[in-house]
Amino acid sequence: MNEHDSERISGLLEADGMAEANAMDEADVIVLNTCCIRENADNKLYAQLGQLKHLKKANPRLQIAVAGCLAQKDRDLIREKAGHVDVVFGTHNVHRAAELLTEARESGPIVEILEETAREDAAAFPSALPAKRESDFAAWVTIQIGCDNNCAFCIVPAVRGPEISREFAGLVTEVKALADVGVTEVTLLGQNVNSYGRDIQLARRQAGEDVRVRPLFGDLLRDVGAIDGIRRVRYTSPHPKDLRPETITAMAETDAVCEHLHFPLQAGSDRILAQMHRGYTGERFLEKLQEARAGVPDLAVTTDIIVGFPGETEDDFVRTLEVAAEARFDSAYTFVYSPRPGTEAAEWTDKFIPAEVTKDRMERLRTVIERSSRARHAERVGKTEIAAVFGPSKRDPDVMSGRTRQNKLVHFASDKPLKAGTYARVKIVDSGMHYLRGELLDITALPTHRTRIPVVSA
Ligand code: 5AD
Ligand code: SF4
């Protein structure tokens, strides 16, 4: 979400007539977009601002802006600590980036933080804005902002506000517009995509409308997947407690929806899961996973796991290992618990886990994840997969890199360079823990529909 915000800020500045600078010291505007979900962004930000001071001396026209969650949290403190900052804005007024810079140029420094995005304020809504995308063929589409859950470790509800879904029709129109400019892959973004539309229904009911059915997330998958030119639909993240059978059916029945589910476990122990307010047990998580795998053949599953949540005992942790082993994840993002000021668990200082204990647990967890990761990648050897090419590999320009439908990184040799956004059929010949190696068979023709892609020779 934060990366997408950065794309939107770049897009807005570009629409305002700016162009990307080649280097920091050539820039007239520098925006630092902060994220405080896990790390203490504080030290990093102030160190970086310190370094920017001399640039400002050399180029008095230089404007420095600080955006994102940390800006929202520190507000006036930023200018108190770093008086050379011109603009401070938060996550709810990204849409004001260009205007704020102009206003500051004319009348001096501005700190503007909004507490929430108003439902009516369509202009403020992510994706309703120009975005300067990193990729020409793949785009993020925000379907929902904020979060109505209250996971005890998580700062998101405090910084992103309550859940607000975008209107269904507007989303479909936006993806059509993206397809018209050559986007073939979209990733639908939300903190809790399975509750998509819940707030729209509630708001309409409160306004006296008789709304019995609301569009569900599965409907969105179907409609977005049916758009001409869209070959791949991904989404992140569903909350395990809210994953519905309809979503699984929609995934299975919509060819464009990729066989990949990001399914954040966080912890395996029922006691810890309850303290986290996650709304499921280890057993229930595994059952839901089983249902998803049964519904969507060849489903790759990735996850997020937190190690060292306050009060996590050895037994609790062993249960995380057990659930992770049984889940056989394709890969996992593993995080050491990081207390976020203002969240519930950050208060439980007497239960914090010593660093040497979390370090040891992290190593043991990685061993378990690596085992399934290697095995799941090895299972792909011998299969033919479609790779969406994103560029030459970092190590060897003759080797192209892409992503399979399961979102696995795949490298393969090509005697001519392939443009980003090319879809190539590759035979998988080898695998590692984080990648596949393939041989190029042919290039698949453009945007008709999906698994049944007509094949032309390379
Ligand atoms: N400490 C560690 N990890 C966290 N995450 C969110 N908040 C914290 C925290 N305070 C992780 C969760 C979430 C992912 C995006 O970041 O695993 O799923
Ligand atoms: Fe944070 Fe939980 Fe909401 Fe995810 S569901 S954003 S972890 S509060």
Image (cartoon, rainbow, N blue to C red):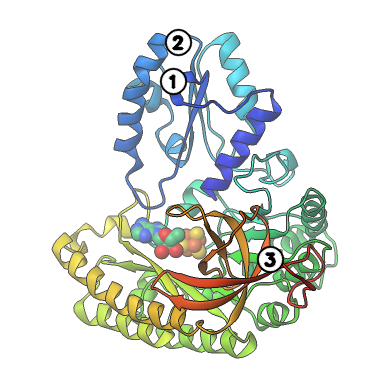
Mark 2–mark 3 contact, CB under 8 Å? no
Q: Distance between the residues labelled 3 and 1?
A: 39 Å
Mark 2–mark 1 contact, CB under 8 Å? yes
Q: Distance between the residues labelled 2 and 3?
A: 44 Å
Q: Which of marks 3 and 1 is in front?
A: 1
Mark 3–mark 1 contact, CB under 8 Å? no
Residue at left offset 83%, top offset 57%? 169
Quadrant in which residue 320 is drawn: bottom left
Near-viewer residue (439 or 252): 439
Quadrant in which residue 350 is drawn: bottom left
- 241 on left or right of 122: left
Residue at left offset 82%, top offset 67%? 448
Amino acid type at circle 1 is: Asp
Near-viewer residue (262 or 55): 55
Residue 258 percent location from the top left of the image: 64, 72
Locate the C terminus and report the quarter of the image it occupies: bottom right
Q: Distance between the residues labelled 2 and 1?
A: 9 Å
Residue 447 percent location from the top left of the image: 79, 63
- 455 on left or right of 264: right
Near-viewer residue (338 or 418): 418
Q: For the image shown, how many numbered marks are present on the structure?
A: 3
Mark 2, ligand 1, within 8 Å: the answer is no
Residue at left offset 37%, top offset 27%? 77
The quarter of the picture showing ligand 1: bottom left
Amino acid type at circle 2 is: Asn
Which of the numbered marks, if any, corresponds to residue 25?
1
